């Protein structure tokens, strides 16, 4: 607590010492005075926006900061709603409580910052571990606050018997590279909160100047100075602590009186229970044994019933569990960019996908990859796609809209306008996951012998919610000749290999063009590698091409490729038998991933 106050004091006195008035936005504001980085700024004449989803806390802001804009909202990567729960007392003594549930609207960070009428000086984000999603909901190319104050740890659990000593988990590695890539530098850290300043401004480096970080012996003097300068805060805190102490002392007295009244009843019940002790003594040798046997038997029965589910292959299953929020921060992105990043050419074929293409394009641009060549080839959409492409025109390498002869033709047209060393395509309803391009470029740079690279995939629904994972084992070229298991949105290859296979997709394929390309890579002697991390998200929805075409065009084109390889069209039994060793390895790596994820508390 003291370190947080010291950091607040350092921000105000050092970063904004020459600025009498300014504007702030506090997301996850919590309390208007206690541990608030904006409290002193408000007292000195600053004004801004406080965002707090808990209704009881927002009421404090409405009373203490009437000249601020106080919003009862939650902030996330996508708009929607989320449920919150407050506990209130049913009696004046506050002994019996009931839960009050209510819905809170979720908006993006861009929606909040759009309400400002003045340039933003300070942006504070404290949302207990969800900072990555809040940061990625803000377009830092348009909004450029001078200072970012971001919660850097997440409270996980309290030690048993010590509720005031929570265990915390550092989480800034999930988003710090994203912040640094948008022109900010670290200027302060107190163990719980990290402070960043815009690189183009000459801001005080708190890491070098604040006594808290220079000399531990100076900390008591700084604490004394801080409390002397803010007598009102110390008085408020002392009054609240006294009120809490009196409340629990009164409850303790009531409990002691209740126990005294109940003591006689307990003694009477003890005498009544004495009559049953003899019977229990007779059954004691038998009952524990039965109980010991019952527990493993019940667990064994449940385990046997779940064995088919546990060991069922997830590869090929497009809906594995109920939709849940996609956590983009479940794997960290690289801590630092490459010294000489290779140019990556990425293209997106599109036709009437206006519902999803904005999110697709944003997932590519938000990579922050410095050597990106990104081109969108549209087939003449009439659903608003062109308006979105015009809005992103300044950030794209280029785009075109014309009638084409299908998806393969559109991809060939787009690749014809690129020159990058590494190539790949992303369909207009799929996503790249954060850090994907950095990991692809890093792997190709460290492994010059590799020609083709792909990774694992996340399955999402029409609302971008997580509905499954495809965890692949290492690459198996023989299995690839029987079935296409490579997630297309995670696939990248070198341009030199593209030239060896004719620099074009076979436009006679409209479903299995990626498998056909992979087999042509194999025939050209390409060396494949599997990167064991999630690179992309594959969207499953009613209008999605894979779901519609696999039972008609898809089967015909896959049989056409198998006949070209093996000289005949194998039946389903033969295909399953040939890929069985690969599927067994998939089941083992998938089971290991699920076990490790559960132990780490990661979804």
Image (tube, rainbow, N blue to C red):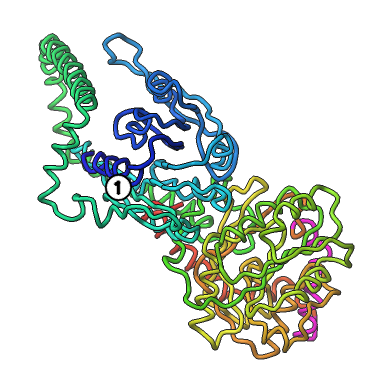
- Does the image show residue 578? no
Identify which residue is drawn at 28% across, 15% down: 95
- Does the image show residue 220? yes
**Dot 1, how many residues are within 10 Å of its Cα: few (below 14), some (14-19), or many (20+)?**
some
Q: Is residue 556 magenta?
A: yes
Q: Tell me how many marks there are.
A: 1
**Relative image position of residue 183 (x, y in whole percent):** 48, 58
- Per the rendered image, the range of residues in magenta is 547-568
Identify which residue is drawn at 53% across, 64% down: 534
Q: Main secondary structure of the magenta part?
A: helix
Identify which residue is drawn at 59% across, 43% down: 78
To which residue does mark 1 refer?
192
Quarter of the picture holding the N terminus: top left
**Relative image position of residue 549 (x, y in whole percent):** 80, 60
Identify which residue is drawn at 57% across, 42% down: 110
- Position of 156 with respect to 575 (left or right) is left
Q: Is residue 71 magenta?
A: no
């Amino acid at each position: 607590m003291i370190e947080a106050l010291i950091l607040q004091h350092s921000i105000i006195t050092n970063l904004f010492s020459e600025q009498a008035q300014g504007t702030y936005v506090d997301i996850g504001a919590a309390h208007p005075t206690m541990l608030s980085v904006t409290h002193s700024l408000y007292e000195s004449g600053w004004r801004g926006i406080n965002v707090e989803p808990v209704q009881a806390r927002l009421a404090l802001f409405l009373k203490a900061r009437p000249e601020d804009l106080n919003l009862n909202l939650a902030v996330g990567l996508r708009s929607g709603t989320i449920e919150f729960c407050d506990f209130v007392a049913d009696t004046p003594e506050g002994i019996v409580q009931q839960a009050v549930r209510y819905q809170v609207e979720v908006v993006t960070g861009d929606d909040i910052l759009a309400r400002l009428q003045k340039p933003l000086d300070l942006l504070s984000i404290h949302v207990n571990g969800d900072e990555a999603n809040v940061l990625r909901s803000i377009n830092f190319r348009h909004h450029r606050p001078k200072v970012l104050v971001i919660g850097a740890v997440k409270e996980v659990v309290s030690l048993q018997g010590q509720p005031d000593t929570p265990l915390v988990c550092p989480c800034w590695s999930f988003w710090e590279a994203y912040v640094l890539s948008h022109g900010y530098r670290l200027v302060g850290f107190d163990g719980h909160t990290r402070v960043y300043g815009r690189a183009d401004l000459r801001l005080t480096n708190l890491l070098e100047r604040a006594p808290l970080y220079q000399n531990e012996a100076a900390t008591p003097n700084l604490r004394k100075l801080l409390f002397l300068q803010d007598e009102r805060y110390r008085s408020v805190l002392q009054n609240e602590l006294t009120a809490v102490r009196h409340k629990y002392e009164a409850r303790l007295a009531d409990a002691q009186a209740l126990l005294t009244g109940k003591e006689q009843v307990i003694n009477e019940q003890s005498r009544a229970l004495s009559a049953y002790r003899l019977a229990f003594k007779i059954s004691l040798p038998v009952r524990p044994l039965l109980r010991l046997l019952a527990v493993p038997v019940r667990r064994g029965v449940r385990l046997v019933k779940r064995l088919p589910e546990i060991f069922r292959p997830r590869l090929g299953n497009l809906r594995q569990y109920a939709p849940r929020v996609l956590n983009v921060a479940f794997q960290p992105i690289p801590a630092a960019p490459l010294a000489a990043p290779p140019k990556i050419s990425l293209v997106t074929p599109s036709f009437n996908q206006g519902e999803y293409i904005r999110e697709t394009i944003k997932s590519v641009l938000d990579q922050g990859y410095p050597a990106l060549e990104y081109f969108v080839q549209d087939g003449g959409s009439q659903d608003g796609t062109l308006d979105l492409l015009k809005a992103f025109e300044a950030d794209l390498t280029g785009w075109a809209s014309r009638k084409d002869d299908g998806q393969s033709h559109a991809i060939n047209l787009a690749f014809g306008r690129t020159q990058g060393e590494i190539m790949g395509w992303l369909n207009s309803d799929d996503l790249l996951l954060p850090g994907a391009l950095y990991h692809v470029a890093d792997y190709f740079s460290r492994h010059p012998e590799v020609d083709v690279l792909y990774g694992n995939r996340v399955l999402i629904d029409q609302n971008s919610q997580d509905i499954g994972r495809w965890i692949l084992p290492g690459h198996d070229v023989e299995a690839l000749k029987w079935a296409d298991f490579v997630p297309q949105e995670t696939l990248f290859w070198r341009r030199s290999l593209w030239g060896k296979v004719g620099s074009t997709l076979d436009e006679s394929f409209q479903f299995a063009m990626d498998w056909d390309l992979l087999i042509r890579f194999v025939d050209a002697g390409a060396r494949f590698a599997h990167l064991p991390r999630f690179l992309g998200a594959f969207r499953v929805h009613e209008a999605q091409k894979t779901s519609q075409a696999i039972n008609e065009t898809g089967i015909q084109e896959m049989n056409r490729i198998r006949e070209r390889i093996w000289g005949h069209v194998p039946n389903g039994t033969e295909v399953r038998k040939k890929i069985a060793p690969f599927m067994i390895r998939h089941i083992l790596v998938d089971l290991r991933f699920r076990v490790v994820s559960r132990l780490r508390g990661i979804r």
